[in-house]
Image (cartoon, helix red, strand yellow):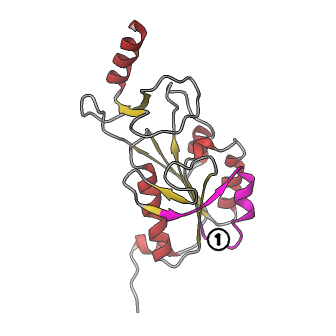
C-alpha cells in the first residue's frame, strides 16, 4: 500500500484554490510560478498558462523568468479569454497579472469555485508604489499569498519597490534592468529626494 505525504496529496487531489505570488521586479515571482506549474505537470495534472499578449519582452509565447527559465504559455488580450481556454484543466497559471483587466478577479474566483487551482504572479505596486491592477483584489480573495522580495541594489536589504530609472510617466512601461531597479523603502525614498533636486 502506497503512503502519501501531505504535499503529495495536495499536488494530486483536484481542489479549487487561488494562490498569488507578488512582489517587486526581480523578486522571483515568475520563477516561483514556473516552479509550481512544473510540479503540477510532474504530478500529471492538466496545466494551462496564460500571459498578457502585450508582454513580449523575452518571448511571444513563453512565460520566461529573469533567469531565463521558460514554460510554454498562451498569450491573451483579456481576462475573459482565459475561461475560453480553461475547460478540462486542473491548474491555471497566470503571469504578469497586473496587466490584466479587473475582470480577472471574477474569472479566478469562477475557476477556483469549479475546482481549478489558480496560480497568479504579478507586481503588487507600480513604479510610484500605487497598488497595481487587479493584484490587490486577487490578494484579498486568495487562499494563499506569497510575497517575494528582490535585493535592494543600493544597500543589500530586502527590496520593497520597483524604482524606474528611465524618464517616463507611463504606468505600463515594459523593461528590464535598464529600466527598473529593486530598492528597499529607505533607498527608494532617498532616490525620490535626489530626483526632486535635479
Q: Residue at x 69, y 66 (%)?
A: 86
Q: Which residues are magenta?
A: 71-91
Specify the farthest residue to the bottom: 1
Q: Percent position (x, y) of residue 101?
A: 69, 42
Q: Residue at x 55, y 34 (%)?
A: 173
Residue 93, by quadrant, is bottom right
Is residue 23 something that shows in the picture? Answer: yes
Q: Percent position (x, y) of residue 42?
A: 45, 76
**Residue nearer the viewer, 157 or 170:** 170
Q: Residue at x 68, y 48 (%)?
A: 104
In this rendering, is residue 14 above or below 3?
A: above
The residue wearing badge 1 is: 89
Q: Is residue 5 magenta?
A: no
Specify the farthest residue to the top: 197
Q: Percent position (x, y) of residue 90?
A: 61, 70
In this rendering, is residue 108 above or below 99?
A: below
Amino acid at each position: 500500500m502506497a503512503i502519501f505525504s501531505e504535499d503529495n496529496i495536495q499536488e494530486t487531489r483536484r481542489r479549487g484554490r487561488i494562490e498569488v505570488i507578488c512582489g517587486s521586479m526581480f523578486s522571483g515571482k515568475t520563477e516561483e510560478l514556473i516552479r509550481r506549474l512544473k510540479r503540477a505537470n510532474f504530478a500529471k495534472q492538466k496545466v494551462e498558462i496564460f500571459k498578457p499578449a502585450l508582454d513580449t519582452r523575452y518571448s511571444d509565447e513563453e512565460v520566461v523568468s529573469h533567469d531565463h527559465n521558460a514554460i510554454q504559455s498562451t498569450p491573451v488580450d483579456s481576462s475573459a479569454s482565459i475561461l475560453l481556454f480553461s475547460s478540462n484543466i486542473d491548474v491555471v497559471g497566470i503571469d504578469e497579472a497586473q496587466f490584466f483587466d479587473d475582470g480577472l478577479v471574477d474569472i479566478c474566483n469562477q475557476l477556483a469555485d469549479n475546482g481549478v487551482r489558480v496560480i497568479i504572479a504579478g507586481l503588487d505596486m507600480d513604479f510610484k508604489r500605487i497598488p497595481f491592477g487587479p493584484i490587490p483584489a486577487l490578494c484579498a480573495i486568495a487562499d494563499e499569498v506569497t510575497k517575494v522580495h528582490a535585493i535592494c541594489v543600493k544597500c543589500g536589504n530586502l527590496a520593497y519597490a520597483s524604482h524606474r530609472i528611465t524618464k517616463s510617466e507611463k504606468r505600463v512601461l515594459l523593461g528590464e534592468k535598464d529600466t527598473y531597479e529593486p530598492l528597499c523603502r529607505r533607498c527608494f525614498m532617498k532616490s525620490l529626494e535626489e530626483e526632486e533636486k535635479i
